[in-house]
């Protein structure tokens, strides 16, 4: 019987696993920390629970309420973060490493909560509008909608980010309304388990929305169907194996992979040895080599340097790395911990041997690592190691071998085109950094890097003060690269959510489309009542409620007055001779006058539930309005979004988007736009 606690799975709403199986050893001193469990999981039951209970509980909420739930979950995790920090040390992580994992994970929840509340509608359907007419009569329109898939998503994660790795995927699939089954890498699964326990205790997790698998996945992938999905982070070899699981191919189960990546950093030729940028380059490379002991999918593996600067870069990088104290992260002053496991240490040192066949050791290496701390001689340490490629143009070497530890290879290049060619030899990476202070160099190099990299980070002194760094994937920017990097995409703002939704094209009459997308589509039926739409509270306002205003003839006085008021005396409005030579052949009213006049036509001036006008989208001036034309406006409630917000005075409010069409006396569209207003609600919630 094991003396150590057993890391448990969370299946069908129950913590599961009593029999000890694999021992999880401390990478710091080799002591046994935990055991996985050997009890077999019934994956049929797990999937069934996700598809029934999980789906039901998630879809009883909507995009907006799930986003709010994520925010509460993030807050709860931060309130309990110290317990996670303590456990994280046992993975070999320093406090800074753990910060990326724990607070980076919670930060991703907050970022998705706020993007979801800002950008997603109420309900469980996203209209990817605007609808477009497909015929000449206006009776047949086309558009796109996104709806939550009917399945479950299986996340298979890597060992290096036990918390962030789970949360960055979970945030997006949760908002999308899909239940998930998370399988963390076994070696650091105890930390993921602790995080899931907190998430469960928070009371914020709808039943069945998240299950946790410790250990093997058994027949899980064989049970998935075309509504399910798999996302994977780990080695390219495992990605290749899993994505070709016969059942996934037969049922066209989407498989998103983020795998090994031979990311590079390029020092541009314009950067002088005594410049700030030169120091920034060395600092960035050193930081990426040592953060998480180089066990980051984004770490810089290849360092591309102009031939004439190679010596200086090697010298400064070696000097910087010499200051990094390696050892037990619990010991003060330690800046780099061990690798995550003894297996990783074995692999990384073997990969170092392979790399040394095509490169020269500059500093570090297999021997001479002297970690600090008790019992560290049994730990999985590897010191920061710099290599220099003997022939960067040769096949193999650092262009092919990923040593997933604090090891980077310097490569000399002749000119920028040579650097571009070497960068591409990674066959597709997650990220590259270009350090340059010359916009022309950036403009030439970056499009070539962008073909091969999921993200390109341009660094100079100006950007450095706020740069989030080469190695940090951000929730609002895409994470994932082509080719060797797995070809997948994660994060990237709301784009990350849409990966978990099913897109369908939609065709039909505007009235039908309006009913489906819960958004007014032009040409659809409108609702006209005696009550001005601005006099209705949020709850009472119906999508499609519309007002056709009285008319107003535009006069020369209007143009003159507006010009004097705004200071806009553009010749088109004031110079009769110049205006005659233009395509309009006469003076026309300011576009902004038309907007203002339209507001004057449709606004209900008295005090009422409309609290504020906070923006305007999709504005187009379509037909010019010369002196003597007569305009009117149609204002229609297009979309309502309930973000559960209150005004600074404590009044509950929702967002209402209004479709505005301004027409002239020939019923031609003069201006078209959406206005966004905050409208008072009758009640909270
Ligand atoms: P693996 O690819 O072996 O494992 C990644 C995940 O896949 C783990 O959760 C693992 O579970 C799981 N897995 C492995 N085999 C199967 C299977 N047959 N069925 C279902 N799940 C499976 O990567 P490692 O974690 O072992 O790391 C190996 C190398 O991968 C590293 O040295 C590095 O080169 C690369 N890597 C890349 C990362 C990236 O983000 N791009 C991150 C981490 C690693 P289990 O742990 O139980 O085996």
Image: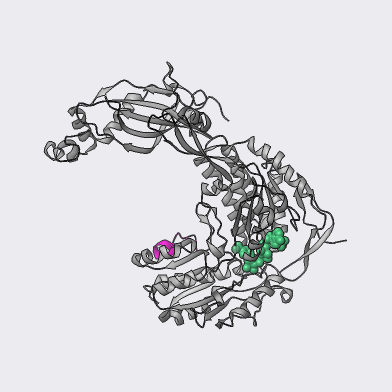
Residue nearer the viewer, 354 or 199: 354
For the point 62% across and 49% down, which residue is it? 170
How far from the left and from the top, in percent, is residue 653?
Answer: 50, 31
How far from the left and from the top, in percent, is residue 446?
Answer: 41, 64
Residue nearer the viewer, 684 or 594: 594
When the figure is inspected, residue 95 is found, relative to residue 657, above or below; the finding is below
When the figure is inspected, residue 348 is found, relative to residue 481, above or below; the finding is below
| Left or right of 29, for residue 269 | left
| Left or right of 124, for residue 452 | left
How far from the left and from the top, in percent, is residue 425?
Answer: 50, 71
Residue nearer the viewer, 201 or 263: 263
| Left or right of 612, for residue 77 | right
How far from the left and from the top, in percent, is residue 137?
Answer: 38, 29
Which residue lies most toward the top here?
A: 530
For the point 59% across and 71% down, which residue is it? 402
Q: Which residues are magenta?
A: 457-469
Q: Give the quadrant of residue 555.
A: top left
């Amino acid at each position: 019987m094991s003396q150590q606690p057993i890391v448990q799975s969370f299946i069908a709403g129950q913590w599961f696993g009593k029999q000890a199986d694999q021992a999880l050893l401390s990478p710091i001193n080799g002591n046994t920390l935990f055991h996985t469990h050997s009890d077999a999981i019934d994956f049929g039951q797990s999937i069934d629970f996700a598809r029934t209970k999980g789906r039901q509980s998630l879809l009883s909420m909507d995009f907006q309420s799930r986003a709010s739930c994520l925010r509460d979950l993030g807050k709860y995790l931060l309130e309990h973060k110290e317990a996670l920090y303590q456990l994280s040390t046992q993975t070999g992580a320093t406090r800074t490493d753990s910060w990326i994992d724990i607070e980076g994970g919670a930060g991703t929840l907050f970022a998705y909560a706020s993007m979801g509340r800002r950008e997603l509608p109420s309900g469980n359907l996203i209209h990817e509008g605007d609808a477009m007419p497909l015929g000449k009569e206006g009776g047949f329109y086309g558009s796109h909608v996104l709806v939550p898939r009917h399945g479950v998503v299986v996340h298979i994660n890597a060992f290096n980010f036990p918390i962030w790795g789970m949360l960055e995927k979970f945030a997006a699939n949760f908002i999308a309304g899909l239940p998930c089954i998370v399988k963390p890498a076994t070696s650091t699964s105890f930390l993921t388990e602790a995080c899931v326990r907190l998430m469960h205790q928070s009371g914020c997790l709808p039943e069945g929305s998240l299950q946790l698998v410790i250990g093997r996945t058994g027949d899980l992938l064989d049970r998935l169907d075309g509504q399910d999905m798999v996302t994977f982070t780990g080695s390219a070899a495992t990605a290749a194996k899993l994505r070709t699981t016969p059942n996934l191919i037969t049922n066209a189960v989407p498989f998103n992979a983020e795998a090994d990546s031979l990311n590079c950093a390029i020092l541009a030729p314009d950067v002088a040895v005594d410049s700030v940028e030169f120091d920034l380059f060395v600092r960035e490379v050193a930081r990426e080599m040592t953060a998480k002991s180089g066990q980051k999918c984004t770490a810089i593996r290849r360092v591309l340097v102009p031939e004439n600067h190679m010596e200086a870069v090697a010298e400064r990088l070696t000097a910087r790395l010499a200051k990094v104290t390696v050892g037990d992260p619990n010991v003060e002053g330690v800046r780099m911990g061990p690798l995550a496991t003894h297996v990783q240490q074995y692999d990384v040192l073997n990969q170092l041997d392979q790399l040394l066949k095509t490169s020269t050791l500059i500093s570090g290496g297999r021997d001479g690592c002297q970690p600090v701390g008790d019992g560290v001689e049994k730990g999985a340490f590897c010191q920061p190691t710099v290599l220099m490629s003997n022939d960067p143009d040769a096949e193999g070497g650092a262009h092919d071998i990923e040593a997933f530890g604090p090891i980077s290879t310097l490569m000399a290049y002749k000119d920028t085109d040579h650097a571009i060619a070497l960068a591409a030899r990674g066959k597709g990476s997650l990220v590259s950094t270009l350090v340059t202070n010359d916009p022309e160099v950036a403009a030439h190099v970056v499009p070539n890097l962008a073909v091969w990299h999921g993200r390109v980070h341009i660094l100079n002194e100006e950007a450095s003060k706020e740069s989030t760094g080469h190695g940090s994937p951000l929730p609002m920017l895409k994470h994932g690269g082509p080719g060797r990097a797995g070809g997948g995409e994660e994060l990237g703002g709301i784009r990350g959510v849409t990966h978990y939704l099913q897109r369908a094209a939609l065709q039909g009459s505007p009235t039908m489309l309006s009913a489906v997308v819960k958004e007014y589509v032009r040409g659809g039926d409108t609702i006209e009542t005696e009550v001005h739409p601005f006099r209705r509270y949020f709850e009472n306002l119906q999508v499609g409620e519309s007002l056709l205003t009285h008319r107003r003839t535009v006069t020369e006085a209007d143009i003159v007055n507006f010009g004097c008021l705004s200071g806009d005396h553009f010749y088109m409005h004031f110079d009769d001779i110049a205006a005659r030579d233009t395509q309009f052949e006469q003076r026309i009213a300011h576009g902004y006058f038309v907007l203002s006049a339209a507001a004057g036509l449709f606004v209900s001036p008295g005090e009422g539930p409309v609290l504020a006008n906070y923006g305007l989208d999709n504005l187009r001036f379509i037909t010019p309005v010369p002196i003597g034309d007569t305009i009117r406006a149609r204002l229609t409630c297009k979309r309502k979004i309930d973000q559960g917000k209150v005004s600074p005075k404590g009044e509950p409010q929702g967002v209402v988007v209004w479709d505005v069409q301004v027409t002239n006396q020939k019923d031609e569209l003069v201006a078209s736009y959406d206005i966004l207003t905050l409208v008072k609600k009758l009640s909270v919630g």
